[in-house]
Amino acid sequence: MSTMNISLPDALKSFVDEQVHSRGFGTSSEYVRELIRKDQERLQLRGLLLDGARSKPAAAADGAYFGALRDRIRKQTAA
């Protein structure tokens, strides 16, 4: 595992220390890793949403669509 050192103003260092203590992280590194993972997930979700917004509309998601979806799921779980 690589190491990275960061400098924080006292107010941010105190905030990190409070989060580590109150949210059950063992170290500030665990807290920062979790923040980075969440940011990666956010960026991935944003990309997926943008891809979806750029895509052409598909079939309408009406009652018939959801009925067919439920039927397909029931068939898969019964098998």
Image (cartoon, helix red, strand yellow):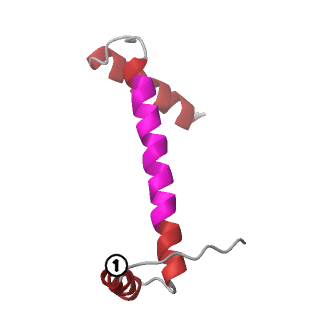
Q: Position of residue 38 (x, y in %)?
A: 45, 58
Q: Amino acid at mark 1?
A: Leu
- Relative horizontal placement of residue 79, taking residue 28 as reference (left or right): right
Q: Position of residue 13 (x, y in %)?
A: 38, 83
Q: Quadrant of the N terminus?
A: bottom right
In the image, the segment drawn in magenta is: 35-52
Residue placed most toward the observer, 77 or 36: 36
Q: Mark 1 falls on what kind of element?
A: helix
How would you rate the neighbour count of disc 1 (Cα within 10 Å): few for under 14, some for 14-19, many for 20 or more? Answer: few
Q: Position of residue 2 (x, y in %)?
A: 71, 71
Residue placed most toward the observer, 3 or 62: 3
Q: Which residue is mark 1?
A: 12
Quadrant of residue 57 in the image? top left
Measured along the vertical axis of the image, is residue 76 above or below residue 32? above
- Relative horizontal placement of residue 66, taking residue 28 as reference (left or right): left
Measured along the vertical axis of the image, is residue 25 above or below residue 45? below
Q: Is residue 74 magenta?
A: no
Magenta highlight: main SS: helix
The residue shown at (53%, 69%) is 33
Quadrant of residue 23 in the image? bottom left
Residue placed most toward the observer, 46 or 66: 46
Q: Position of residue 53 (x, y in %)?
A: 37, 22
Measured along the vertical axis of the image, is residue 75 above or below residue 42? above
Q: Quadrant of the C terminus?
A: top right
- Relative horizontal placement of residue 17, taking residue 5 as reference (left or right): left
